[in-house]
Image: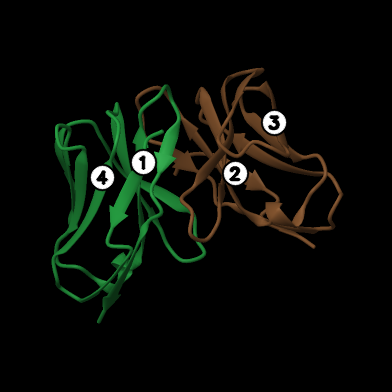
Amino acid sequence: DAGITQSPRHKVTETGTPVTLRCHQTENHRYMYWYRQDPGHGLRLIHYSYGVKDTDKGEVSDGYSVSRSKTEDFLLTLESATSSQTSVYFCAIREVNTEAFFGQGTRLTVV
Amino acid sequence: KNEVEQSPQNLTAQEGEFITINCSYSVGISALHWLQQHPGGGIVSLFMLSSGKKKHGRLIATINIQEKHSSLHITASHPRDSAVYICAVRWRGEKLTFGTGTRLTIIP
């Protein structure tokens, strides 16, 4: 199995609080991605990174920010969580022209 | 925008049946991925292909670039194959666009 871990795996937080999800890899892959998965939708890209300090927005980036200060870690931050951000979040890693490897997911509930 | 459509959305079959799941997309791509997600579980990559056909065990994936279409086949289906199968395409840089998945249930 590819070395990719997400933390936490589950989180319940209150509306308006900041939340940070962590994705850690041991594969030294260049590309890292954050997706959210909601019923009736395919996985949707929030942000992705193509190198240390190099990030770009995806299709559902509003309300989210990311940082990648070293190759192995990609952080997703919800600055002020809202109920619409209740979802399952997946991190993925890839190298150029290779398959994608996914973390186990983080179930986030905003109450 | 690349539209990715999967069919059927839901599929129930008897153990042993031959299964076909389809994926079509609207814009030319550099690669197509098939993924598997078990209930409550993580997502596992099954195949990445840009042309032709690939086989792994009882799973076969094909792609027709001209028709913008791919199929995932499962031979001799088994209850442990029950999962959601997801198609994703890579078409601009290194981003992936995902279909909404096909929920497969195999009845013993």
Spatial distance from mark 4 to mark 1, Cα to Cα? 8 Å
Q: Label 2, secondary structure: give it.
A: strand
Q: Which amino acid does label 1 sit on?
A: Glu
Residue at the image position 24 percent from the left and 71 percent from the top: B78
Q: Using residue A95 as the reference point, say whether residue A77 is left or right of it.
A: right
B71 vs A65: above or below = below
Q: What residue would you read off at disc 1?
A: B3
Q: Which of A107 and A1 is in front in this view?
A: A107
Which of pointers 4 and 2 indicates the residue nearer the eye? Answer: 4
| Chain letter matching colour green | B
Contact flag, marks 3 and 2 (Cβ < 8 Å): no
Res. B63 image quadrant: top left
Q: Which disc number belongs to residue B24?
A: 4
Spatial distance from mark 4 to mark 3, Cα to Cα? 32 Å
Query: Which quarter of the rendering shows the N terminus of chain A?
Result: top left
Q: How crowded is mark 3: few (under 14 residues within 10 Å), some or many (20 or more)?
A: many
Question: Do discs 4 and 3 share a chain?
Answer: no
| Colour applied to chain A | brown
Which of pointers 4 and 3 indicates the residue nearer the eye? Answer: 4
Q: What residue would you read off at disc 3?
A: A66
Spatial distance from mark 3 to mark 1, Cα to Cα? 26 Å
Q: What residue would you read off at disc 2?
A: A5
Query: Which quarter of the rendering shows the C terminus of chain A?
Result: bottom right
Question: Do discs 1 and 2 share a chain?
Answer: no
Upstream in the sequence, badge 3 or badge 2?
2
Q: Which disc number belongs to residue B84?
A: none
